[in-house]
Image (cartoon, rainbow, N blue to C red):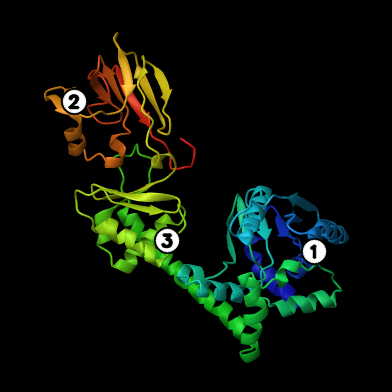
Amino acid sequence: MTPVHIRLRDALQPWRSAPGWCVALSGGLDSTVLLHLLASLAQREALPPLSAIHVHHGLQASADNWPAHCRALCAALSVPLQVEFVRVAPGASLEQAARDARYAAFTGRLGADELLLTAQHRDDQAETLLFRLLRGAGVQGLSAMPVSRALGAGQLVRPLLNCSRDELLAYAREHTLSWVEDPSNADERFSRNYLRRQVLPTLLGRWPQAATNMARSAAHLSEAAQLLDELAQQDVAAAEVFGEFAWLPLPVLALPVLCSLSEPRQRNALRYWLRPLTAMPDSEHWAGWQALRDAAQDAVPVWKLAAGELRRGDERLWWLAGDWLCSPVSVNVTVQGNQHVLLPVNGSVRIDGQLPAGNWQLGYRQAGDQILLPGRGHRDLKRLFNELRVPAFVRNRLPLLRLDNQVVAVANLPSMQGAVDGSWQLHWQPPTNDQGLS
């Protein structure tokens, strides 16, 4: 067994009980070697079922021959192959669009706990580190490619990160493997190709261990990123808000807890909290956080980000996206008891119980609206919202019921959401943060 076999086997040890291993097979040198290594390893040891997937983008004429090449390779190794034909959406970055289409196909292919194995190696890791360094990435970005990460229902695993491209090339020649060459890899207009063809060879000519050392630095930075995440987990957990307004399906943090942290620690906690929600802002745009945090108490500041926005209200920090970014469409609907009503871009309401006879209208707050409260008389809704500390961005969305043009119920608010005797109530299911879903 070769040293490459041993390193590959060791790298995959944590996933030996996975229900299946699927190789992302482009037909190039790296993925061809990975597939051959695994097929030969499977002849010696009991491995999970092995398969391969080839994604055809249709971006260049030469690529039309690659599915046939991959089929021949897989047939020779007795490995099942699935070929996926995808359409690459036009956009500013062809590379990114092709990657998005490719990974969408991979995600659709993976079953629960299955592995997608990709063939990135040590030189790719060094290239990624350089590329991100030149773009001014932080610790998270400079940790480069992780060995594994979640992908759909399964995991993406890179088992060759401890191997160099020269080792893979030597293996391929020793076993007389054939592979395809992507002509776009020679196009130095793409930044990664320029780094691979011009910059890295120069560095390696002067420092032969440069790729190994850069990969080691990426591993150190990955550890640092993990420690920062663990600190952020603690800070975010301390700032989480429970109980009040639990009916709002929105991420929320207590602002005073965040403000008690140092500035770098605030940004670290927010990056961790926002990571699954939106693309991170660059360094200059973090001024938006400072403006939101330091605004006057009576201000309603907003920090707009790529996929949504942060709002501040009553010492809380709220994340809004999807329908929450749209103004609710005015409604004035005649209703009766035991009814469910969908609200445009504002979720839905449900009337539980039978309403007394009368002209009942479902709508939203208007200027000067009042409600009659037992023992308190008629009270202005604006003042009541202030008393209950209802977030400003929610107030014009709260559905309410009018009887003969008089407000008699406001959804979800204690003491205001229905009859005193509990015979009927108005419940609001707010919109979610998902695009187009409520």
Q: How many neighbours does mark 1 have within 10 angstroms: few (below 14), some (14-19), or many (20 or more)?
A: some
- In the picture of the structure, the residue carrying the numbered disc 3 is 281
- Label 1, secondary structure: give it: helix
- Label 3, secondary structure: give it: loop
**Along the viewing direction, whichever of 16 and 228 lies nearer the viewer:** 228
- In the picture of the structure, the residue carrying the numbered disc 2 is 370
Where is residue 188? Give x, y as percent: 67, 73
- Label 2, secondary structure: give it: strand
**Label 1 to label 2, Cα distance in Å?**
74 Å
- In the picture of the structure, the residue carrying the numbered disc 1 is 39
Figure check: 277 above or below 181: above
Q: Residue at x 22, y 29 (%)?
A: 367
**Along the viewing direction, whichever of 124 and 111 lies nearer the viewer:** 124
Where is residue 345? Give x, y as percent: 43, 34
> The residue under label 2 is which amino acid type?
Gln
Figure check: 185 above or below 281: below
**Label 3 to label 2, Cα distance in Å?**
42 Å
Q: Quadrant of residue 38?
A: bottom right
Q: Earlier in the sequence, mark 3 or mark 2?
A: 3
Q: Are marks 3 and 2 in contact (CB under 8 Å)?
A: no
In this image, 128 relative to 39: left or right? left
Q: Quadrant of residue 207?
A: bottom right
Q: Work out which quarter of the rendered image holds the N terminus and state it.
A: bottom right
> The residue under label 1 is which amino acid type?
Ala
**Label 3 to label 1, Cα distance in Å?**
43 Å
Q: Which-is-in-front pick, marks 1 and 2?
A: 2
> The residue under label 3 is which amino acid type?
Pro
Q: Earlier in the sequence, mark 1 or mark 2?
A: 1
Where is residue 89? Give x, y as percent: 64, 51
